[in-house]
Amino acid sequence: MNISEHRETILKDIELKYDAINQKTDTQLEGLLYAKPITYWDYIQTDALLSLQTQRTTLPDEMVFIMYHQVNELIFKMILWEMQQICYCENIQTHFFTERLMRISRYFDMLTTSFSIMEEGMEVEQYMKFRNTLTPASGFQSAQYRLIEFTSTDLINLIDNRFRSKIDRSTSFENAFEHLYWQAAGKDYHTGTKSYLLEEFEKKYKSAFLKHMEEYNTINIYQKFKQLPVEDQNNPELVKAMRHFDHTVNITWVMQHLNVAIKYIDHSGKGDGEATGGSDWKKYMHPKYQRRIFFPDLWSEEELANWGVEKVS
């Protein structure tokens, strides 16, 4: 095909594109005459992105803290983007399932290794000063991370370990929500009183969470896996990808996060450090307490029994 024929083919395809939406091709082509060429900074929205870092103190290391968490939220958005492709894919094939899961795992691998930026990249003295300005805000309030959990597995696997025997798939989403594992970090179960941290979080996101819980109830990643033919469920590469994702999110990443928290929150070594939101952060964060396991059927009894027992360095 010569250049002229190639151009004619492109023009015909363009006409078909605009005919399908009842638009005039000539109008669209004429618009190209006046359109500005795209630039990197306009496409990436660099100026807007770099204007979002606003310090609340005069301490330089607060900027590291802000940008690091903003990067995390961008990565969370990438993860949710890949998850949506898995969950809404009809007649999903094992190769596609595996490839997308490994993309997600690489994002979490990146998040895991990036904790060194926080662990080694801020002075403890500075952090202990500017963190008081952040109170009562907390990373606990990352809505995207909660959406990742809801998209990954059945709700029963996110219920506080103390209440799982009382919850099943017939339980209302509202009731399940009140017994999610992270509620333990923001609620006094003796009095039922919720902390300001949790109240504000729910005020902002609860309706969206309930909607998402219902939307992904039958199409979350675990459900998509269990809906595959048995032969595909036994595909070694897919099983490996599922296990890697589960372990990376619920043990490796969490333990690295915990290590950083210990350095800054419990830097005195007395065990009495308090998180900015006031949560019981060790029991909330450590996987051995809440046993967050997305795909329990893919682990042996021994592996399940020893979940999250890795020592904190």
Image: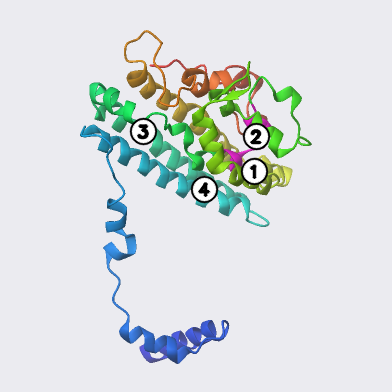
How far across and how far down the image is residue 247, in percent? 52, 30
Which quadrant would residue 271 be assigned to in this image?
A: top left
In this figure, which residue is indicated by the disc labeled 4? 80
Query: Dot 1: few (<14), some (14–19), or many (≥20) neighbours within 10 Å?
Result: some
At x 62%, y 50%, the residue is 87
Instruction: Please report whichever mark, 3 or 2, sits nearer to the chain's N-terminal start.
Output: 3
Does residue 2 appear in this view? no
At x 63%, y 38%, the residue is 153
How far across and how far down the image is residue 95, in percent? 57, 51
In this figure, which residue is indicated by the disc labeled 1? 210
Marks 2 and 4, Cα distance to the nearest angstrom? 20 Å
Q: Give SS at disc 4.
A: helix
Marks 3 and 4, Cα distance to the nearest angstrom? 20 Å
Split into 4 quadrants, where in the image is the N terminus?
bottom left
Instruction: Please report whichever mark, 3 or 4, sits nearer to the chain's N-terminal start.
Output: 4
| Residue 177, disc | 2
Vertically, is 92 above or below 160?
Answer: below
Instruction: Please report whichever mark, 2 or 1, sits nearer to the chain's N-terminal start.
Output: 2
Magenta segment range?
Answer: 149-159
How far across and how far down the image is residue 114, in percent? 34, 35
Split into 4 quadrants, where in the image is the C terminus?
top left
Marks 1 and 3, Cα distance to the nearest angstrom? 32 Å
Foreground mark, 4 or 1, reads 1
Foreground mark, 3 or 4, reads 4
Query: Dot 4: few (<14), some (14–19), or many (≥20) neighbours within 10 Å?
Result: some
